[in-house]
Amino acid sequence: MVGLRGSSGSGKSTLLALCAGFITPRAGQVERVAGLAWLGQAGHLFHGSLRENLQLAAAGEADDALLADAMALAGLGVDDPALPDGLDTRIGEGRRGLSGGQAQRVALARAWLSGARLWLLDEPTRGLDPDTAKAVWQRVRAMATDRGAGVLVATHDPLVLAGAERVLHLVAKRLQEVDDAAA
């Protein structure tokens, strides 16, 4: 668990996008890592069923039991009233039909289903109330540990930074290690 902090506009999201291969550097190079999962600021979901959204990340065809397990691990069971048709619940483009916290949990379930060994998270608790943010972050930690995944998380959230094993501070386009007392 590595936390990445910095002021707004310091380049945290850009650094994550470089790591993910979404953009290429103007100079130097970035070593590509096979098998990474991306969880953006607003858990992007696609128009279709919950099952289809989860299957996007599953290595091969995942059966309903595995999909339901992933959702339960993420803290949103398929029997939740917010998902009236379970795995067949329709989701509109851009997560229509789900709250921000629910969308983050679906995106988290996708990360777990992917089997990726590196998770890149960009402000995973942004816009969530404190209780939901705490629950989502606890799920991230538990699920990443379960999968043996490393996590690089860009955040302003002190709760998330406090749970990181290391914290890096992005200042003037340079990464600096943050000692425990300053974190």
Image (tube, grey):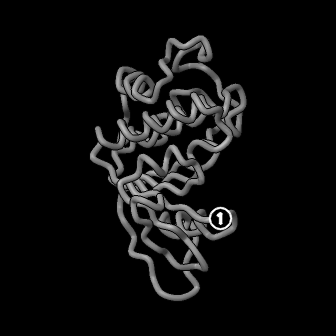
For residue 49, what is the image quadrant? top right
* Secondary structure of residue under mark 1: loop
- Quadrant in the rendering for residue 43: top right
Name the residue tied to disc 1.
7
24 relative to 180, above or below: below
Task: Indicate the amino acid at tag 1.
Answer: Ser
At 45% from the left and 82% from the top, the residue drawn is 29
Q: Residue at x 41, y 27 (%)?
A: 67
Which residue is depicted at the point 58% across and 79% down?
A: 173
Could you say which is closer to the camera, residue 13 or residue 86?
Answer: 13
Q: Nearer the viewer, residue 158 or 101?
A: 158
Image-based side of 65 in relation to 101, left or right: left
Residue 149, percent from left and from top: 32, 49
- Residue at the bottom extreme? 27
The number of callouts visible is 1
Question: On screen, 33 above or below 163?
Answer: below
- Residue beneath the point at 64% across and 70% down: 10
Depicted 44 relative to depicted 103: above or below: below
Give how far across and how far down residue 144 sits, in percent: 35, 43
Q: Dot 1, crowdedness within 10 Å: few (<14), some or many (≥20)?
A: few
Q: Is residue 38 above or below residue 55?
A: below
Q: Is residue 40 left or right of residue 64?
A: right
Q: Position of residue 177 (x, y in %)?
A: 42, 70
- Rendering coords of residue 63 (x, y %): 36, 25
> Please, which residue is most extreme toward the front here?
181
